[in-house]
Image (cartoon, helix red, strand yellow):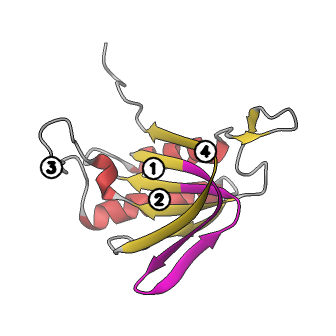
């Protein structure tokens, strides 16, 4: 699984002309599910994101997690994160898991965040969405579970 994580002052998602999720300070997380991803990967990614120390402490060091600052997380399903754009000009999406299984794993990720004590809002799987946000920092990270290069010697 791949997550693009952005620290935000606020974020919201709209689908079919109505707001379906909104948070104040916290994290905007786009999630792409890959063809080889498992429920264990979704849980591991949830734990990782919940505890990432990407908020400043009193000394302005990145030492606090979203939970430490009382923030929330807006999760946006985003299969295009699994795109392969190394060749040509049109990305290939053969690495993106489709359908109901991808939806289940994306939901398992959101559930893992909740299990870690995070308040979670979500976009709509498979929908055309409009996302609005105010970036904070900016702080942006890409996290892969399993990590890129895992298992290679």
Q: Which numbered disc, 1 or 3, marks the residue that appears first in the sequence?
A: 1
Q: Which residue is mark 4?
A: 138
- Circle 3 packing at 10 Å, graded few (<14), some (14-19), many (20+), is few
Q: CA distance from mark 2 to mark 3?
A: 30 Å
Circle 2/circle 1 CB separation < 8 Å: yes
Q: CA distance from mark 2 to mark 1?
A: 6 Å
State the residue in front, 130 or 142. Answer: 130
Q: Name the disc covering residue 90, or none.
A: 3
Q: CA distance from mark 4 to mark 3?
A: 28 Å
Q: Is residue 66 visible?
A: yes
Q: Of the residues tagged 4 and 1, which is closer to the observer?
A: 4
Q: Which numbered disc, 2 or 1, marks the residue that appears first in the sequence?
A: 1
Q: Which element type, helix, strand or loop, lies under badge 2?
A: helix
- Circle 4 packing at 10 Å, graded few (<14), some (14-19), many (20+), is few
Circle 4/circle 3 CB separation < 8 Å: no
Q: Name the disc covering residue 108, or none.
A: 2
Q: Which residue is mark 1?
A: 42
Residue beneath the point at 48% across and 68% down: 131
Q: Which residues are magenta?
A: 6-28
Magenta span main SS: strand
Residue beneath the point at 86% across and 32% down: 59
Residue lying furthest left in this view? 88
Q: Which element type, helix, strand or loop, lies under badge 4?
A: strand
Q: Position of residue 99 (x, y in %)?
A: 25, 66
Q: Which numbered disc, 4 or 1, marks the residue that appears first in the sequence?
A: 1
- Left-right relation of 50 to 75: right
- Circle 1 packing at 10 Å, graded few (<14), some (14-19), many (20+), is many
Q: Is residue 34 visible?
A: no
Question: Does 10 lie within the magenta span?
Answer: yes
Q: Of the residues tagged 4 and 2, which is closer to the observer?
A: 4
């Amino acid at each position: 699984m791949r997550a693009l994580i952005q620290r935000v002052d606020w974020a919201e998602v709209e689908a079919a002309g109505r707001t379906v999720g909104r948070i104040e300070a916290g994290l905007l997380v786009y999630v792409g599910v890959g063809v080889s991803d498992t429920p264990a990967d979704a849980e591991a990614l949830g734990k990782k994101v919940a505890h990432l120390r990407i908020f400043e402490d009193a000394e302005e060091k990145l030492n606090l997690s979203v939970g430490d600052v009382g923030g929330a997380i807006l999760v946006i399903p985003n299969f295009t994160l699994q795109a392969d754009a190394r060749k040509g000009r049109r990305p290939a999406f053969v690495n993106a898991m489709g359908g109901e299984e991808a939806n289940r794993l994306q939901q398992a990720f959101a559930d893992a965040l909740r299990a870690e004590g995070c308040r979670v809002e979500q976009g709509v799987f498979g929908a055309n969405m409009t996302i609005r946000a105010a970036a904070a920092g900016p702080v942006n990270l890409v996290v892969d579970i399993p990590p890129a290069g895992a298992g290679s010697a």
